[in-house]
């Protein structure tokens, strides 16, 4: 497993090194658009974030464990 993880890290690092410049350029281009989108849709983004918190709370109430992603049942 250690060899696999080392190879995986090596491949992921090489992949990122190839993509980094393009990613950075793309983020510079999209950043103003994201700010504009957030300004136009901020209320809905906040409402969705609150609803997601409500969903997580409801899931925890029925046994969902955020640490494992599983549902713990009794009995």
Image (cartoon, rainbow, N blue to C red):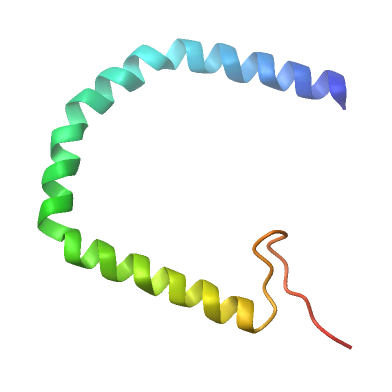
- Which residue corresponds to the image point at 59% horizontal and 77% vertical from the top-left? 59
Using the image, determine if residue 32 lies above or below residue 43. Answer: above
Quadrant of residue 20 within the rendered picture:
top left
Q: Nearer the viewer, residue 66 or 20?
A: 66
Using the image, determine if residue 52 lies above or below residue 37. Answer: below
- Horizontal side, residue 31 vs residue 36: left or right: right
- Which residue corresponds to the image point at 58% horizontal and 15% vertical from the top-left? 13
Residue 37 at x, y = what percent?
A: 15, 49
- Which residue corresponds to the image point at 16% horizontal and 43% vertical from the top-left? 35
Residue 66 at x, y = what percent?
A: 64, 63
Residue 72 at x, y = what percent?
A: 77, 76
- Horizontal side, residue 36 vs residue 52: left or right: left
Residue 36 at x, y = what percent?
A: 11, 45
Q: How many labels does the image show?
A: 0
Q: In which quarter of the image is the C terminus?
A: bottom right
Q: Nearer the viewer, residue 9 or 50?
A: 50
Quadrant of residue 10 within the rendered picture:
top right
- Which residue corresponds to the image point at 49% horizontal and 11% vertical from the top-left? 17
Q: In which quarter of the image is the N terminus?
A: top right
- Horizontal side, residue 73 vs residue 41: left or right: right
């Amino acid at each position: 497993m250690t060899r696999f993880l080392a190879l995986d890290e090596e491949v992921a690092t090489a992949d990122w090194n190839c993509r980094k410049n393009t990613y950075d350029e793309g983020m510079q281009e999209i950043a103003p658009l994201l700010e504009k989108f957030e300004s136009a849709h901020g209320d809905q983004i906040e409402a969705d974030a609150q609803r997601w918190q409500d969903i997580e709370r409801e899931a925890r109430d029925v046994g969902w464990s955020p640490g494992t992603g599983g549902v713990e049942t009794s009995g």
